[in-house]
Image (cartoon, helix red, strand yellow):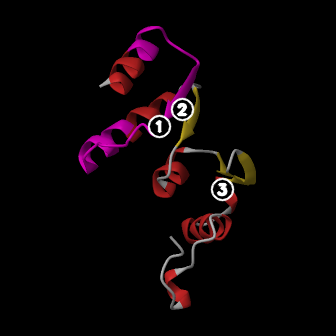
Amino acid sequence: MRQKVGIALAIAKNSKVLLLDEPTSGLDPKSSNDFMQLLTKMKNEGVVILMATHDLFRAKEISTHIGIMRSGILENHTDTSTISLSELERIYLSIMNYKNIGENEAYNL
C-alpha cells in the first residue's frame, strides 16, 4: 500500500525521479503488469526510475541499464539493449554463485 501511495504522490507532484524498492513484491501478475505499464509511461515522459528488484524479466522490460549488486558491491552494469534475458539471467546466477539448471546440479542455496 505504501508503494501505491508513493507512486500516486510522485504522479501528483510531477516528480522527475522515482526510487523504488521491490515495487512489484506481493502483487498478483495483473497488478504487476499494470504497474510496469505505468512505469513505462512515466519513463517515456522523462521520469528517471531507480528500482531495486530481483525480477530480471521486469527489470529488462522497463530499464535502459541494469546493475547487479552482491553484498553492497556493484558486480555488473549492462545496457539492456545489448543483452538478452537469458544472458542477463546467466550473469546474475554466476554472480550469485548459483548453478544454472542446465548444469545438472541443484541450486547452491
Q: CA distance from mark 1 to mark 3?
A: 15 Å
According to the picture, the residue beneath numbered tag 2 turns out to be 43
Residue at 54% from the left image edge and 25% from the top image edge:
18
Pointer 2 local density, CA inside 10 Å: few below 14, some 14–19, many at least 20: some
Element at badge 1? helix
Residue sitting at the far bottom: 104
Q: Residue 30: give x, y in percent of width and height.
A: 25, 46
Separation (CA) of disc 3 from disc 2: 16 Å
Q: Amino acid at mark 2?
A: Lys
Q: Quadrant of residue 92?
A: bottom right
The residue furthest front is: 109
Residue at 40% in and 40% down: 36
Q: Is residue 56 left or right of residue 24?
A: right
**Crowdedness near tag 3: few (<14), some (14–19) or many (≥20) residues, C-alpha within 10 Å:** few
* Residue 97 screen position, x and y as percent: 63, 70
Q: Position of residue 19 (x, y in %)?
A: 55, 27
Residue plotted at (61% across, 72% down): 90
Q: What residue sits right under mark 1 in the picture?
A: 40
Query: Is 16 placed above or below 81 here?
Result: above
In this view, 84 is above or below 53: below
Residue drawn at x 54%, y 32% is 43
Q: Quadrant of residue 22?
A: top left
Magenta span:
9-35
Category of crowding for the residue at label 1, using alpha-carbon neighbours closer than 10 angstroms: few (below 14), some (14–19), many (at least 20) = some
Dot 3: element: helix
> From the viewer's perspective, is 22 left or right of 82?
left
Is residue 106 a member of the stretch shown in magenta? no
Asked if labels 1 and 2 touch by Cβ distance under 8 angstroms, the answer is: yes
Quarter the N terminus occupies: top left
Q: Amino acid at mark 3?
A: Ser
Q: Amino acid at mark 1?
A: Thr
